[in-house]
Image (tube, rainbow, N blue to C red):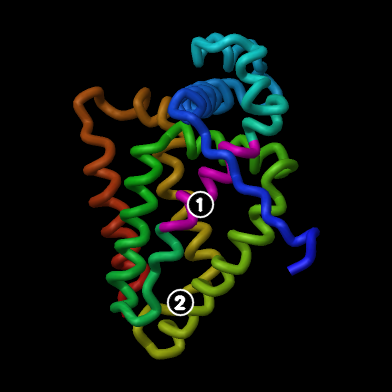
Amino acid sequence: MSDTDVSVPIKKQSRIQVRNRKRIMDAALIVFSENGYRGATLDQIAAESGLSKPNILYYFEGKQNIHLALLSQLMSAWLAPLDALDPDGEPLEELLSYMQRKLAMSRQYPRESRLFANEILQGAPRITPHLQERLKPLFEEKAQVIQVWIDQGKLALVDPQHLLFSIWATTQHYADFETQINILLPKDTSVGADAAIFLHQIYDRLLKV
């Protein structure tokens, strides 16, 4: 090994540093999801987190770095349900389970869903590399899995890519348009349970041979 091959050990963060980074990320998620990237400011994030602006800049170089960290973290979680689609599983059951996992995530993490939607609506200026390098290969792989199931006669004839778009649209609607849903439906409506039943019925009828 040459003198230039010496690896530099990564300094472990202290408990306070880990805690403060989480406070900043949690606060930024609220601020970005409510105001969008352009409307969000470091002052708002500082106020929400209870930390000073200089303290925030100690952990992140600026607003864009915080936003990128959130999007990267979100992308990993957002891809997990699609990644879990099992090529060896029962096709209809796999797709219905995927739809239910996406719906559960949208209902459980509405701010994260709106953060992602806002970024896409702006043309994905900060997350495009993630979409190209992480989402696109997985999307193509799973679309091919669905196509194989269709060719084997295990699913109805549908376009696999647009099927995935449809699942994303219908499930994330319950997060991205939550305010509208709450206005339109009666106050005592069990939105999550009703949506799960309704979407299951739709995709079961659409996909069953």
Q: Quadrant of the C terminus?
A: bottom left
Instruction: Identify whether 78 is placed above or below 148.
Output: above
- Residue under the image location 34 percent in, 76 percent down: 91
- Residue under the image location 52 percent in, 34 percent down: 13
Count numbered badges in the picture. Answer: 2
Secondary element type, mark 2: helix
- Residue under the image location 31 percent in, 54 percent down: 100
Instruction: Write down the region rendered in magenta.
Output: 68-80
Q: Mark 1 is on which residue type?
A: Ser
Residue position for label 2: 146
- Residue under the image location 55 percent in, 9 percent down: 47
Quarter-wise, where is residue 106 in the image? top left
Quarter-wise, where is residue 15 in the image? top left
Q: Residues within 10 Å of mark 1 (few under 14, many from 20)?
A: few
Q: Position of residue 71 (x, y in %)?
A: 58, 41
Residue 50 relative to residue 55: left or right: left
Residue position for label 1: 76
Q: Is residue 117 visible?
A: no
Q: Position of residue 114 (x, y in %)?
A: 52, 35
